[in-house]
Amino acid sequence: MKKRLLSAAAAAFFGVLLNAQQIKFEEYDLPNGLHVILHQDNSAPVVTTGVMYHVGAKDEVKGRTGFAHFFEHLLFEGTPNIKRGEWFKIVSSNGGQNNANTSMDRTYYYETFPSNNEQLGLWMEAERLRHAEINQIGVDTQREVVKEEKRLRMDNQPYGNLMNAIQQNLFTNHPYSGSVIGSIDDLNSAKLQEFRDFYKKYYVPNNATLVVAGDIKPEQTKKWIQEYYGGLTKGTVAPKNFPKESPITKETEKTVTDPNIQLPAYIFAYRSPSNKDKDAYILNMLSSYLSSGKSSVLYKKLVDQEKKALEVQAFNLGMEDYGVFGFFAMPMGETTRQTLQADIDVEIKKLQSTLISQDDYQKLQNKFENQFVNANSSIQGIAASLATNHVLMGDTNLINKEIEIYRSITKQDLQNAAKKYLNSNQRVIINYVPEKK
């Protein structure tokens, strides 16, 4: 009876938290196609203004890679009304902070200001969209910035090109075979007009989602949005008809060298479905079951008990068109790749042949409930989630109902996904090893 009462209390506690987690928002389109999402939260005097453009590394053409990420830097160069070098000064001097980031699928810019500067954030993002300065001095300056970033994050970083190795070998037709940072040679050889054409093609209101979240008065915010964004001209957005991948039907093995490492790493990579697909959520759960935390199956066996690996991890990287499910293992001592592969395969076979225990299933559900409760704990996080769910997932309200997808996943679903996606003939094995000297 006592245990039942405790369970009821826990359920009630989570119920309160989940109800409090509901994110209320309003969304609408301007006539020029700009999608607007407003979220009012007057609990703290801050406002985040973010704009997500539906352009990422996958939209680039062969021979001109790196453009999407390059624009993440270039579009802080200024506008006719914001002098070169003044963007960050304006933000910091008005008590704000700002940043931008790029993925294979989208580019996102945002400012967070005290709420008395909400109008400033809206104006600055409208400036970026209306008439960003694309000139030779800006291009030349940001080329050097990107070169240094590539050296620091990838070329001189141990295991810095590991994700590139996975994507290059897992995708042969789709542009996910490239990298977000792209090729410096491509950027060096590109002409100024090509950058201007890229801006004209993708930085248009009907390829953008504007989100304003925080201490706002919605009616006033709408007036400012109409003033700053309403007069922008609608562009022509080309359909995203990317080449499809044929199913992987035969295991392949590749070796990639890295001059910055002393210990090898082994990756067993499988192509997984789009992050819009329910199976992507199921694979998220499977990766958590296998390697999240010291009590997880693979960590406990290979790292803790048998001391065969320094590190082991299962992951599911969801993207808009496809995903990547993989196992990463770094051997301990003389442990071979074949040994790690055999042990990982044993756990896959268990998943394919036997339902996980009720205790393990409940732990998974509790973990994802907890993640949901703790997600979106800041206005910046809420703004990014709202934009992402609209642009990449096609449903802004996933910010509230995504947990229902995880709750609906059964033990049988986990087994079925393991059977469907994690077969040896569907994978690429990557030996990521030190470069011989």
Image (cartoon, helix red, strand yellow):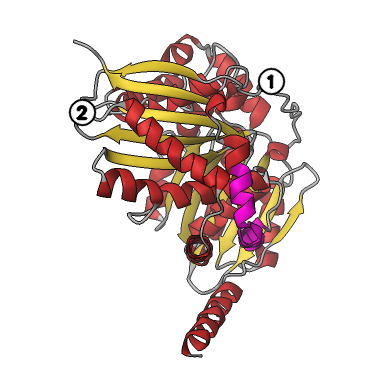
Q: Give the residue displayed 54% in from the left and 11% down from the top.
A: 63
Q: Is residue 366 visible?
A: yes
Amino acid under label 2?
Answer: Glu
Find residue 433 and report its horizontal and vertical position in percent.
Answer: 29, 21
Amino acid under label 1?
Answer: Pro
Indicate which disc, 1 or 2, sits on the residue closer to the N terminus: 1
What residue is disc 2 on? 334
The secondary structure type at the circle numbered 2 is loop
In depth, the one of 76 and 213 nearer the eye is: 213
Mark 2 Cα-neighbour bin, 10 Å: few <14, some 14–19, many ≥20? few
What residue is disc 1 on? 243
In depth, the one of 80 and 387 nearer the eye is: 387
Q: Main secondary structure of the magenta part?
A: helix
Q: Is residue 66 visible?
A: no
Query: Is the residue 374 above or below the residue 390 in the image?
Result: below
Find residue 142 and report its horizontal and vertical position in percent.
Answer: 41, 25
In depth, the one of 155 and 277 nearer the eye is: 277
Q: Is residue 411 magenta?
A: yes
